[in-house]
Amino acid sequence: MKFVKRFFVWIMFLMIISFIFFAVSYSEAQSWEKVVADGFDNAKNDYAWSMATFKDKLYVGTLNSYGGAEIWCTSDAEATTWSKVHDDFLLSNRGIRCLYPDGDQALYACTFHPNGAQILRTTDGNDWKTVKRRGFGNRGNRSIRCMTRFGEYLYAGVGSNGAKLYRSKDGLDWEQVEASPSFLDTKIYNSRRRAVSINMMVGELAVFNDYLYAFTWVKDADYQNMWWFVNWVKEENEQDEEKFQIPEAAGAFEIWRTKNGINWEKVVGMDDAYGNGMGFSLHDPENEDNDIVTSVAVYEGHLYLGTGHDYGKTTVWRTSDGTSWEKVLDFNEEGEAYNYYVWRLWSFKNQLFVSTLNLGPAGNPGVTGGQIWVSPTGEKGSFDPCVHNGFDGEIINMTEDLDLPKNYGIRSVGILNDTLFIGTATVPSFLVTKPGRRLVKTIAAKDIGCEIWKMIPDKP
């Protein structure tokens, strides 16, 4: 019973942090140095949620659910000196979920805000102006997770109550993309036998082979536990499974692409023409519960994506044509059962890197805390771990029943002066709760603060 209780607490903890949204040695080719601790001296900066390079400076956007998001920067490749260039206390943005540099023209900060996401813009890195607020006029648009340039437009992926795209030519005036067909056309029957749209958010965007790709999430902050909840209701009420017209997959994403920003083709999803199915459920029936796409990257002629999975069956896939996909990394097959997100994918010095959110049991060394895996080719069987245990293996005691890794996720990545920087996600400052039959009981709260780590190549 104690194990069941601890496991349930871990699962509930993972669900809550999603709302704001083998023992191995390090690679011989690199080592790591911590250059920022304690959330830039603000322990409520829980995540280094985003990172970008703009005009020879490295910028970091934080998640801070109490004091408001912050943006920090450095021009020092040693990262010994940092300056706070934005403090969001008055605007009440909880976090900077995406930093996107549009060349040298402007740097954009996309936020999570409970009353509608915002876009902040700067041309010099110091003077930030809010160019969109209140979720583009829809306060249900609480999150902007991604942005990219495609042709003459900047595109922003938006959501929480429905997957939407907005675009702008100048970064100041934005319009909603009237996609045809609409991302919201994919519907299923929920537990009340009502047809509901399941694409709740555009979670990632990528440009590949002259197409713009949009990766739509079935679930987000308000909906991410819908599948778990429905299954729980079925079990509690011993209802017949056929009465609940929800797929067995815990969620499962869709992938869309376009050449003009308006006319879209579904290449992965419900009833797609290529036999992939939602979350590759038709392509890979044994691993159909790929819930969301949490990261994408283009590397050596392939488009890569990394999934999030409620039960740790996280994977990395790639395609050369956008329609035929192959799985190149399966953490379960590698003996890793606790990587719940592939949080970032990126290339650096002719290698493809994969970072994760990992909530392995603290009593089992080698599987606890964020990980980084690396491959020179991106091919199946070529990935090796180079970081484990959240860099330093430090454990935070939350309660008598719950120990957690301090750096449970590798959340953001940046490159400055040919040096790789990594931002972590740490134990959150907000209250961790546990549901009861009638009440929700508070069991823990911690102030730790995110960290920034720097890769140091070993001398030959």
Image (tube, helix red, strand yellow):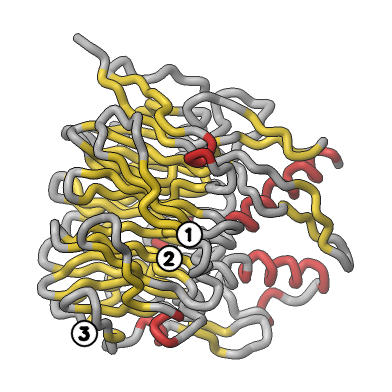
Between residue 353 and residue 319, name the one nearer to us: 353
On screen, residue 185 versus residue 389, left or right, reads left
Count all numbered tags in the image, as a single digit. 3
On screen, residue 378 versus residue 393, left or right, reads left
Single out the mark in the foreground, 3 or 2: 2
**Extreme-right residue of the structure:** 438
Marker disc for residue 409 = none
- Which of marks 1 and 3 precedes in the sequence? 1
The answer to whether mark 1 and mark 2 are in CB contact below 8 A is yes
Between residue 283 and residue 118, name the one nearer to us: 118
Residue type pointed to by label 2: Thr
Between residue 131 and residue 183, name the one nearer to us: 131
Single out the mark in the foreground, 3 or 1: 1
90 lies above or below 432:
below
Marker disc for residue 111 = 2
- Which of marks 2 and 3 precedes in the sequence? 2
Residue 342 shows up from this direction: no
Residue placed at 21% from the left, 84% from the top? 262
**Cα separation between marks 3 and 1:** 30 Å
Between residue 54 and residue 197, name the one nearer to us: 54
